[in-house]
Image (cartoon, helix red, strand yellow):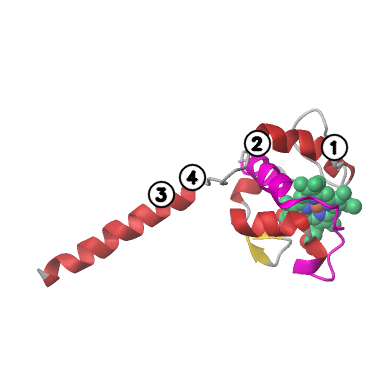
Amino acid sequence: MFKMLPCLVVALGLCGCQKSATVAVPQGNAERGELLVARYGCAACHALPGALNQGANVGPPLFGMARRGYIGGVLPNTPDNMVRWLQDPPQVDPRTAMPSLGVSAAEAADITAWLYTLK
Ligand code: HEC
C-alpha cells in the first residue's frame, strides 16, 4: 500500500504542472482586456503586439508576457499577482516607474486575461 505513495505523489505533481500551464483568469475576458489596454494607453510606455504598438520603450515589451518569470522583477508571474500589479504597481514596488492608472479589479482581471494570451 505504502509503496504506491510515491506514484501518487508524482501523479499529483504532474496534475499540478498541467494546471499551471493553462493559465485561467477567473472572470477575465481577453477581448475586453485588449480594449482596456487601448483605453489606458499602455502602448505609450510598452511595446506590445497588435495595431496599438508604437514601439514605446519606457517599460519592458509585453510580448511573451505569459511566459515571463517575474512581474516588475519582484512578483512571481501568476494571474493573482498580475491583477494586483495592474491595479497599483507602486504599492507592490514603491520604486517602480509604472504609475497607478486607476485600473479596477475587474478591469485588471480582463487585462490579465489578455496579457496571458501573449505567449
Ligand atoms: C508611464 C508608463 C507606463 C504606462 C502608461 C504603463 N506601464 Fe506598465 N510598466 C512601466 C514600467 C516602467 C514598467 C517596469 C516596472 C518595473 O520593472 O518596476 C512596467 C511594467 C509592466 C509590467 C510588468 C512587465 C515585466 O516584464 O516585468 C506589465 C505586465 C505592465 N507594465 C503592463 C501594463 C499595462 C497593461 C498597462 C496599461 C494598463 C501599463 N503597463 C501602463 C511603465 C508603464
Q: Is residue 106 magenta?
A: yes
Among the 4 quarters of the image, the one containing residue 14: bottom left
Badge 1 residue CB within 8 Å of ligand 1? no
**Viewer-proximal residue among 101 and 119:** 101
- Earlier in the chain: of badge 2 and badge 1, it is 2
| Neighbours of disc 4 within 10 Å: few (<14), some (14-19), many (20+) | few
Q: How many marks?
A: 4
Q: Residues within 10 Å of mark 3 (few under 14, many from 20)?
A: few
Compared across the picture, whether 40 is left or right of 64 comes to right
Identify the secondary structure beneath mark 1.
Answer: helix
The amino acid marked with disc number 3 is Gln
Residue 89 within the segment the image draws in magenta: no
Nearer the observer: mark 3 or 2; the answer is 2
Residue count near mark 1 (Cα–Cα under 10 Å), binned few <14, some 14–19, many ≥20: few
Instruction: Give residue 49's quadrant in the image.
Output: top right
Report the disc number at residue 18: 3
Magenta stretch in the rendered image: 91-116
* Residue at the spot of label 1: 39
Counting from the top left corner in percent of width and height, residue 86 is at 75, 54
Q: Residue at x 76, y 50 (%)?
A: 104
Residue 103 position (above or below residue 75):
above
Sequence order check: which comes first, mark 3 or mark 2? 3
Mark 4, residue position: 22
Residue 30 - label: 2
Please identify the quarter of the rendering in which residue 99 is found.
Answer: bottom right
